[in-house]
């Protein structure tokens, strides 16, 4: 029985000097969403604003590594999310 040698390298190398357009698009999308969160949290009425699905997904996936320009953004986002969870928990307990 003869065995054919398998190629175990599944990585597609990019040529030097060629930009990965999908990676650039994803980085731009991530930066836009982070800027959107930053803008919302710096409003004077930040405590009544809600996050959309894309913002929640980014905070869920990259929350530990996001560096916001302002120091208060992360604290305010945490406050909004905690308030939402507490409200949802109290609504569920009445059912």
Image: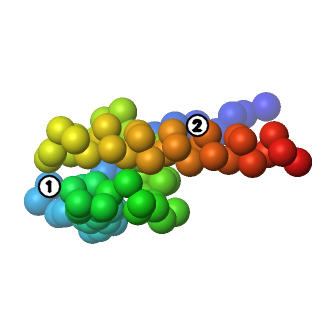
Considering depth in this image, is 25 or 35 the residue closer to the camera? Answer: 35
According to the picture, the residue beneath numbered tag 2 turns out to be: 5
Considering depth in this image, is 4 or 65 the residue closer to the camera? Answer: 65
Dot 2: element = loop
Residue 24 place in picture, x, y as percent: 25, 63
- Residue at far right of view: 95
Count of residue discs = 2
According to the picture, the residue beneath numbered tag 1 turns out to be: 16
Residue 34 place in picture, x, y as percent: 28, 56
From what the image shows, is residue 26 above or below residue 81?
A: below
* Image-based side of 69 in relation to 28, left or right: left
Residue at (88% x, 48% y) in the render: 95
Considering depth in this image, is 92 or 57 the residue closer to the camera? Answer: 92
Residue at (14% x, 47% y) in the render: 69
Say if residue 64 shows up in the picture: yes
Q: Residues within 10 Å of mark 2 (few under 14, many from 20)?
A: few
């Amino acid at each position: 029985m003869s065995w054919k040698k398998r190629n175990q390298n599944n990585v597609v190398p990019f040529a030097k000097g060629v930009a990965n357009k999908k990676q650039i698009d994803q980085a731009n999308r991530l930066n836009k969403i982070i800027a959107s969160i930053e803008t919302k949290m710096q409003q004077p009425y930040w405590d009544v604003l809600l996050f959309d699905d894309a913002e929640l997904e980014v905070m869920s996936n990259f929350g530990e590594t996001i560096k916001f320009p302002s120091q208060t953004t992360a604290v305010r986002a945490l406050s909004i999310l905690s308030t939402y969870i507490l409200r949802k928990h109290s609504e569920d307990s009445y059912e």
